[in-house]
């Protein structure tokens, strides 16, 4: 009997092993892949290939582990004859999947919709794997040991990443060592070792997650789980481990400077107080000591590192953008440009200078708004480099290289070409001649730079929703449909009109544009249904000593933290697989807890 019981438990652990490997391995993958720039992507990239370190192989291994997980699940269904009982709770998830599939199938850009955009790779196959791992976790977790294995895998991954984050913050980035460069680069690219540098600001933590903002998403997922285990576990060793990991995660969250991460964790902790209020009141003294310790750490770090926390929170406050003035008290800025056949008008702090191309003798003339010639001088060392010293246009420079004009001021540089008809065309980020557009906008006027330019991005994204009510344009096609040639908007916001906007910095807008408003509604119904049902289970628990009560509460708070962060962060392959597996664990914990108390 003992041997038979052991066999069942071992089989069960093997069954969810691929999910454990996703949690343990996928977030840490960093390896270079030279991705060919083909098809529609050629419109946005000037190079023939893009070097990807953080997304391509994460996607590949995530899909591979998911496929293995599917085979394991089928084996247990049809060979081991394990009975799986599903629930109507998953109907909205299946509706979401249906509209993801339809949006992909009817997309104008099938390759991007199914395989994903460069640097992201979150196409149909990836989203399908999100849904599959959630369903497998929800239905095939049957023992507490399953959840312990998954939490343990995530914990080990988190520990390694947190230690890496500390090395990044204190100036010794392990990823930038020669050893790791050798590991991350394929052998044929080892000549890049000396030039390889991930250009993140000093004292910012990015781990292996591509972006400090994604560190905020990661911490919002994992930190609530650790804190719940710290408060509810009866095992003193687990308390020590979860407490230590909580401190490391908190430090990395602070060092990432992800304001959305701060808010996501804060909301999750507020919900924790509501959910575990009885336990907190019962042990109020150690909880108070913990709060005081955290407050002390926050205060110390904020003071020691020049307001590392308060500065990020203050920057989140709405603040109207100041008018662009003189740079260094002398030079003016380019604030807009219009193109009309052979006439280009450049605005220097709203003062226009007209550049006229004479198609007969192929010469340029420069006129002010009254039609008078504007004086300029040529650089002595380069006669094609024109400098403008007149007060209204001081700081403007033109560098002429055959039919291409490099136009610059102290804040920006961009390129314009003259086509075969003698007309001016703007050169976009891919080096392609295009017409300038004025994008339709909604709100945020004067607040374009708010929240790290989210004001601008959201204001240009919201008008796109009218075209994606039923079906979206296809997963990961957002960059294709965003008004990338909105010259003035990008110039005001980024100081560079060639900045590529490839994500909306909002998971919900991302879904609405890529897979449609119906798919977004289905997703929201699914997760809100889960949250409401979980709160009903755990708000007045019948058995607060149950392991599944602890696991279910932890997953609930983790999901809430991630969804809050999703208001200003995108879904991405670096973090989203963790979210979907935790969501599945949450459903499994609810099912097992209900079975236990009835």
Image: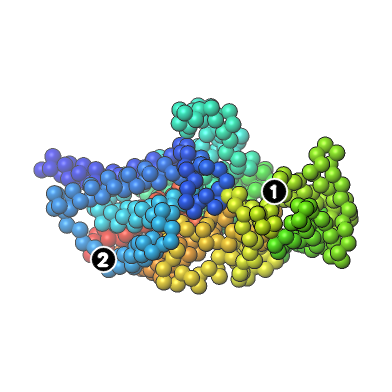
Q: Which disc is residue 87 wearing?
A: 2
* As drawn, 393 above or below 35: below
Residue 154, position in %: x, y? 39, 45
Residue 499, position in %: x, y? 62, 53
Neighbor class of circle 1 (other Cα within 10 Å; few <14, some 14-19, many 20+) is some
- Which residue is at a point 43% across and 58% down the rendered structure image? 109
Residue at which label 1 appears = 404
The Cα atoms of the two marked residues, 1 and 2, are separated by: 62 Å
- Which residue is at a point 43% across and 61% down the rendered structure image? 108
Circle nearer the N terminus (1, 2): 2
What residue occupies the far left of the structure in this picture?
A: 1
Instruction: In this rendered view, identify the residue nearer to me: 73 or 346.
Output: 346
Which quarter of the rendered picture does the N terminus lie within? top left
Q: How many dots with numbers?
A: 2
Residue 455, position in %: x, y? 62, 63
Left or right of 517: which side holds 84? Answer: left
Left or right of 65: which side holds 254? Answer: right
Q: Give the number of the mark in front: 1 or 2.
A: 1
Mark 2 residue element? loop
* As drawn, 527 above or below 167: below
Residue 170, position in %: x, y? 60, 36
* As drawn, 443 above or below 573: below
């Amino acid at each position: 009997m003992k041997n038979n019981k052991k066999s069942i438990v071992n089989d069960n652990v093997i069954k969810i092993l691929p999910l454990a490997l996703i949690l343990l391995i996928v977030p840490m993958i960093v390896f270079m892949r030279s991705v060919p720039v083909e098809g529609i992507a050629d419109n946005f990239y000037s190079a023939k290939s893009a070097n990807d370190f953080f997304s391509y192989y994460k996607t590949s291994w995530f899909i591979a582990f998911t496929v293995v997980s599917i085979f394991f699940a089928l084996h247990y269904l049809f060979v081991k004859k394990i009975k799986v009982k599903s629930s109507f709770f998953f109907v909205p998830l299946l509706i979401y999947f249906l509209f993801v599939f339809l949006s992909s199938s009817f997309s104008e850009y099938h390759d991007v919709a199914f395989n994903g955009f460069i640097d992201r790779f979150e196409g149909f196959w990836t989203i399908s794997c999100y849904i599959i791992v959630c369903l497998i976790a929800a239905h095939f977790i049957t023992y507490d040991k399953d959840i312990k294995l998954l939490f343990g895998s995530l914990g080990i991954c988190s520990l390694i990443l947190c230690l890496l984050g500390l090395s990044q913050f204190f100036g010794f980035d392990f990823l930038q060592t020669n050893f790791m460069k050798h590991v991350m680069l394929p052998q044929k690219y080892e000549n890049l070792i000396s030039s390889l540098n991930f250009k993140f600001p000093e004292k910012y933590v990015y781990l292996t997650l591509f972006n400090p903002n994604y560190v905020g998403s990661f911490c919002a997922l994992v930190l609530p789980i650790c804190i719940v285990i710290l408060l509810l576990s009866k095992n003193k060793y687990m308390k020590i481990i979860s407490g230590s990991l909580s401190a490391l995660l908190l430090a990395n969250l602070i060092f990432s400077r992800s304001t959305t991460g701060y808010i996501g964790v804060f909301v999750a902790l507020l919900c924790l107080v509501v959910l575990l209020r009885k336990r907190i009141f019962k042990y109020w003294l150690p909880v108070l000591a913990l709060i005081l310790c955290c407050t002390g750490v926050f205060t110390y770090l904020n003071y020691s590192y020049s307001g590392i926390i308060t500065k990020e929170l203050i920057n989140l406050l709405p603040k109207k953008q100041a008018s662009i003035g003189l740079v260094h008290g002398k030079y003016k800025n380019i604030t807009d440009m219009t193109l009309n056949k052979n006439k280009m008008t450049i605005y220097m702090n709203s003062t226009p200078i007209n550049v006229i191309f004479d198609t007969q003798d192929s010469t340029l003339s420069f006129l002010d708004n009254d039609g008078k010639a504007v004086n300029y001088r040529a650089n002595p060392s380069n006669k094609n480099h024109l400098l403008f010293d007149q007060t209204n246009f001081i700081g403007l420079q033109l560098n002429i290289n055959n039919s291409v004009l490099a136009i610059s001021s102290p804040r920006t540089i961009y390129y314009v070409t003259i086509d075969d008809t003698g007309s001016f065309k703007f050169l976009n980020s891919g080096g392609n001649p295009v017409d300038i557009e004025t994008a339709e906008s909604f709100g945020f006027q004067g607040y374009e730079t708010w929240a790290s330019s989210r004001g601008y991005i959201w204001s240009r994204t919201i008008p796109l929703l009218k075209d994606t009510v039923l079906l979206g344009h296809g997963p990961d096609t957002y960059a294709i449909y965003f008004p990338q040639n909105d010259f003035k908007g990008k110039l005001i916001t980024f100081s560079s009109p060639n900045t590529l906007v490839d994500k909306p910095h909002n998971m919900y807008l991302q879904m609405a544009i890529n897979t449609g408003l119906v798919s977004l509604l289905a997703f929201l119904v699914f997760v809100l249904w889960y949250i409401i049902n979980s709160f009903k289970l755990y708000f007045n628990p019948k058995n607060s000593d149950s392991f599944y009560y602890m696991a279910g509460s932890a997953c609930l708070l983790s999901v809430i933290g991630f969804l809050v962060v999703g208001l200003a962060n995108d879904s991405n392959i670096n973090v989203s697989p963790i979210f979907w597996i935790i969501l599945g664990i949450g459903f499994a914990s609810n099912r097992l807890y209900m079975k236990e108390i009835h």
